[in-house]
Amino acid sequence: MSKHIKDLTIEKLMDKIKTYITDEKELSIIEEAYKFAYEKHFDQKRLTGEPYIIHPLNVAYILTRTNADYETLSAALLHDVVEDCNVSIQEIEEKFGHNIAILVDGVTKINKLNLSGTTEALINNQRKILVGLSEDVRVIIIKLADRLNNMQTLFVHSEKKQKSTARETLDILTPIADRLGIGSIKQDLEELCLRYLKPDEYYDIVEKLNATKAERDNSVAKMIESVSELLNKHDIKHEIFGRSKSIYSIYKKLEKGKRFSDIYDLLALRILVDTEQDCYQALGIIHSKFRPKPKRFKDYIAMPKTNMYQSLHTTVFGVDGQLYEIQIRTYEMDKVAEYGIASHWSYKEKGSVKAVMQNEMEQKLQFFRAIMDLKREQENPEEFVNTVKKEVFQNTIYVFTPLGDVIELPNGSTPIDFAYKVHTNVGDKATGAIVNSHMVPLDYKLKSDDIVKIITNNNSAGPSREWLNFVQTTHAKNKIKNFFNKANKEENHKKGEEILTKELRRQKISNDEFFDDEKFKKLLSDLKCNSLNELYGNLGSGKLSIDTVMNNYLKKEVNKEEKIIEKASKGSQKQNMSNSLVSIAGIPDIKVNLASCCNPVPGDRIVGYITKGYGITVHRMVCPNVASLDERLIEVKWNTESSKLPTNILVRTNGLNNALIDIISKAANNDIPVRQFSSHRSKEDEAIEMTVLVNNKEQLMKLINDIKMIPEVTEAERLIK
């Protein structure tokens, strides 16, 4: 594990940097960044008692382990001056350029975030750091180095602070280091977190490792000698090292119930060779002498992990009959294993380091594509963070396409989640699934290493609403919902077009006349529609009545007050109970009834119909009983939503089970009384008509949506008689 260096100087740092950066201009910018930071942090002390400048020096020194570029190192040295020294980002940009300023600004913003907690503010902070990953990945690499140095000096804080910082690091930052593939920083962070969260377990493992160190070192030395001799005999150029096992990984295995003596890879070797072909040759040569342990071989070269890790893993019975875990990889693979996305600092021939790293990130890490997809789908902050924790950071499985491509999914995912991950069209047209050469149901729970083939049908009507009951990924849920939203939009468009065509035919108005360019543009403007398609959609959904459209087109002037006075004189009575819910502007004492054909409830778009002797009857605007009326309609509006009103719904089920109990239960859960119901069964299905009492449309629509989630229900809608 790397240590915090108390006496680190700029000279030591520059010596390390010069081992891989040789450009004099870049080196001078790094030195200027140090001088600026030293001046701004002068006289500031850390809680350890050290000069503050030791912290940014250590952060930069940690980043040299990843061969960080000069912009990242400069930003590391400057990363606290904005927050702690009243320096503006504009000043950083003037002195060091736009790119360095952007990095410093990004780290400054992240440093202001509390990455733990569940309140909306904290959740928003988590969202910012996660989405920030997709903007410039170097920001988060600096943050990881910053946190590592802070963890190295965490002993100066209270036990409560130590544990909260360690928990936050383990929950949020180490998974990010893992996904970025930066194994060297990830391992250090995990071990430091374990030291503060579970000190007894940590020091127990350290003690056991120390007690067996001499014996293990002796065994490993013998095995290295034997394997090296074998590879030399077959002319395989190589380097071979003993490999210390991560304390945190030992802890995780002990936590699962393993005994210390049963952890195979306490004795471990790493072999580095020149080419991929050499990896496989070396593996065969080793297996020819040392018997491999069954089910302990992993080929991460042919099937890399999503964080780009590649290596061959095998466990063999070695010298003295002891088990050894051996990793075989090329030098390039080893670089990627240690530094992951940060191994792509070499950018001279490819363009800017940011562009190269972002391109690598988006191409190779499904994790980041998932983050960006979630960002585009605009979930609310709480849903976003919960989804990221569930789908991105925890319980991941890896399944394969028939061509061997790896697809990463959250645990519990189904073939439908897989299908939508591959492509939206594959999901929409899915009709079946084959897993490991066997047909499986679409709600089958996939497991790691499954090979999945989706059966599609181009003539498929699209996804089923029932899929929403079992899909796991937010991505799949949103795609399914989008399909039905689009289908409803198309249906409303078609319905609206039919309504308008029928009315034009009835009034003997030709299309050429109605769609006259200037007059039609004026009509759209008056109706607040941006296009003909929007007009059709609003007509089909009931947002606009055909009478409103035609009145605007023909400019009919209807003296509604005269009609009301006339009707009121014929049938004026004291207002009934419904009148307390609905009002007509300027007319206080007029009888109001709610139409029993469409049963409007607060929240519905409504219109009044003047009846002979019965005052005003209120209908839903989409009610067909008023669709063709004009002269006797009047504008009305809701006053309150306090009373429960009756309305009718129609539910269709597949008839396989008695769904009525579940339907009534859903109503009870929503505090909605069922006044009456009737059931009609046919060969195809069962239809249930219900009258329910609701406060408003929102409550009614929630009930309908809840009923649609019942497996036996095929359709649920409001009923107009």
Image (cartoon, helix red, strand yellow):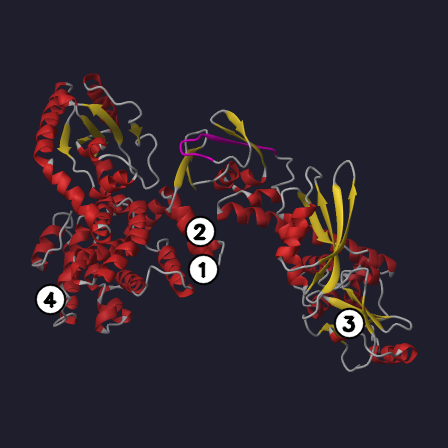
Residue 25 placement, left or right of 461: left
| The C terminus, quarter of image | bottom right
Q: Quadrant of residue 714?
A: top right
Give the Cα distance between marks 1 and 3: 41 Å
Residue that appears at 51% across and 36% down: 415
Q: For the residue labelled by badge 1, is the local secondary structure a helix, a strand or a loop?
A: helix
Mark with earlier residue (2, 4): 4
Range drawn in magenta: 446-457
Which tag, 4 or 1, sits closer to the chain's start?
4
Q: Of the residues under marks 3 and 4, which one precedes in the sequence?
A: 4
- The residue under label 1 is 381
Q: Earlier in the sequence, mark 1 or mark 3?
A: 1
Q: Are marks 2 and 4 in contact (CB under 8 Å)?
A: no
Please give the label number shown on residue 387: 2
Q: Quadrant of residue 675?
A: bottom right
Q: Circle 2 — which element?
A: helix
As helix, strand or loop, the secondary structure at mark 4 comes to loop
**Amino acid under disc 3:** Ser
| Among the two numbered marks 2 and 1 on one chain, the one whose residue lies closer to the N terminus | 1
Q: Nearer the viewer, residue 583 or 235?
A: 583
Relative to residue 157, is residue 557 drawn left or right?
right
Foreground label between 3 and 2: 3
Q: Give the Cα separation between the discs numbered 2 and 4.
A: 42 Å
Q: Residue at x 16, y 68 (%)?
A: 36
Callout 1–callout 3 Cβ contact below 8 Å:
no
Which of the numbered marks, if any, corresponds to residue 578? 3
Residue visible at 49% across and 47% down?
475
- The answer to if 452 sits in the magenta stretch is yes
The reply to whether dot 2 and dot 1 touch (C-beta < 8 Å) is no
Instruction: Judge whether 479 appears above or below 601 on screen.
Output: above
Query: Which residue is identified by label 4?
Result: 49
Q: Quadrant of residue 78?
A: bottom left
